[in-house]
Amino acid sequence: MKKFLKITGYTVSFLLIIYLTASMFVPEIVDKDHNQIRQKPPYQVSEEAQQLYKSLDFRADLHCDALLWKRDLLKEHDFGQVDIPRMIKANMGLQGFTIVTKSPKAQNFDKNTGNSDNITLLYMMQRRPVSSWKSLTKRAEVQCEDLFDFEKRSKGLFRVILSKNDFVRYLSDKRKNREITAGFLGVEGAHALDGELENVETLYKAGVRMMSPTHFFDNKLGGSAHGISHKGLTDFGKHVIGEMTKKHMIIDIAHSSPKIIDDIIEMTDAPVISSHTGVKGTCDNVRNLSDKHLKAIARSGGLVGIAMFKKAVCGTDASATAKAIKYTIDLIGADHVALGSDFDGSVTTPFDVTGLPLIVEELLKLNVSEEEIRKVMGENVKNFMLENLPDE
Ligand SMILES: [Zn+2]
C-alpha cells in the first residue's frame, strides 16, 4: 500500500510538473502559429493614402478574437494582429472584441459537428479558472473580465463601451486626445449560453453587446453555415433573438446558415450585421453572403464588415479585401459597409492593425470616393453604435 501511494504521488507530481511547464510555453506557441501576418510592420503606402487615413475622423473594426489567446493586450507584441498599443498607433476608434467559446477539432468550412472541442484544452493550458473549462457561459465571462481588466490597468488609455452614453462621452474625449482607444464585446456562437435563455442576461451583464447565433457547428439555436443540418432558427433560437432585441444587443449573422439569416430578417425589425464576412460576388463559398442577403442587411439598417483573410476574400493581400468592399458598396451603397478584419481569429492576415492604411490605398486605386472610404473605415460603425447601443 505504501509503495502504491508513493508511486501515485510520484506520478501526480510528474504530471503536475509537465502541466505547469507546458502551460508556460504552449499557449504562446499556439497563438503565434494561429495568428500570423504576411508582412511585418511598418507598412509603406502612398502619400495620398497616408494623408487620407490620417484625416479620417473615426476608424473602426467590428471583429477580432484577440481575447482568446490570453495575451496581455496592454503590451505591444511582435506577434498576433492586434493589441491596445498597436490600436493606438493606428489611431483606432473602436474595435469589436468577439469571444470564441468552442471550436471543433479539424475545423473546416464545409461540415463540422459540435462533438469535439479545441478550446477546452487551450483554456486548461492557459490556466484559466477550472469553472470555465466546463461551462461555455463561464468561458465567455472570463474573456469579458479580461477586457475590463485591461481597461482598469490601462490608466485611461482604453475603454470598454457598453452604452450610447459611454460612447458619446468617449467620442468627445477621443476628439481631445487621440492617444485613447476603445472596444466593445461580442460573442461568436450562442452555444455560449449553455442552452439557457436566462444566460442572455448573464452575458449582457458581463458586457456583451453583440452575439451571433452559431459559429462553426449547429447548436440549440439552429444551423451553422459550416454545420450539418443547415436548418433555420429553432424555437429556442427565436426566443434568444427576441431577448437580444429587447436588450438592444446587436444581432450578428456571421457564420449562420442562410436559413437562419432568412428567419432573423423575417422575425425582427432590428438592424442585422455581419461582423466579419466575405461576399459571394467576389469569393463564392458557404460562409460568404449572397447578394440577396447583402441587400436584406442594408434594408434592415445593418452593416457588412468585410474580413481580411484568404478564405473570406479569395486573396492574400489588401486588394482582395478592397475588391469585396467595392463590390458591396456598388450593390448596397457605402452606408452599410464596414471593416470586420477577424484579426487574431486563427487566420493569417496581410498585415496587423497598423496596416489598415493599405486598405485605403487599395480603395483609392479602385476609384472609391474619399467620402465612401471615410464611411467604410469607421463612420458607419460610429453612427451605427450611436443609434443602436442601449441608452445606458
Ligand atoms: Zn469567425
Image (cartoon, grey):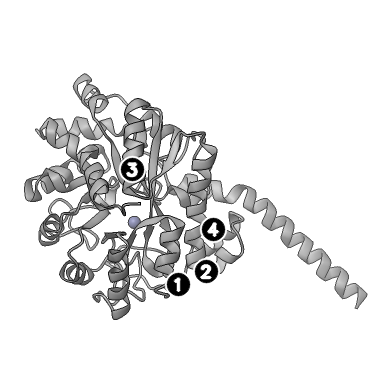
Circle on res. 135: 2
- Rendering quarter of residue 41: top left
Residue furthest out toward the left: 330
Question: Could you tell me how far apart the alpha carbons at marks 2 and 1 are, in whole angstroms?
Answer: 7 Å
Q: Nearer the viewer, mark 4 or mark 2?
A: 2
Disc 4 on helix, strand or loop? Answer: helix
Residue 54 placement (x, y as % from top left):
26, 25
Q: Can you identify the residue that label 1 sits on? A: 194
Residue 272 in the image: above or below residue 111? above
Residue 51 placement (x, y as % from top left):
23, 22
Q: Which residue is at 50% across, 62% downward?
A: 139
| Quadrant assignment for the N terminus | bottom right
Q: Can you identify the residue that label 3 sits on? A: 167
Whether label 1 touches label 4, CB < 8 Å: no
Question: Could you tell me how far apart the alpha carbons at marks 4 and 2 are, in whole angstroms?
Answer: 14 Å
Q: Can you identify the residue that label 4 sits on? A: 122
Q: Nearer the viewer, mark 1 or mark 4?
A: 1
Question: Could you tell me how far apart the alpha carbons at marks 1 and 4 are, in whole angstroms?
Answer: 19 Å
Question: Could you tell me how far apart the alpha carbons at marks 3 and 4 are, in whole angstroms?
Answer: 33 Å
Mark 1 or 4, nearer chain start: 4
Whether label 2 touches label 1, CB < 8 Å: yes
Viewed as shown, does residue 222 lie left or right of 368?
right
Q: Which of 175 and 297 is in front in this view?
A: 175
Q: Which of marks 3 and 1 is in front?
A: 3
Mark 2 or 3, nearer chain start: 2
Residue 224 placement (x, y as % from top left):
30, 69
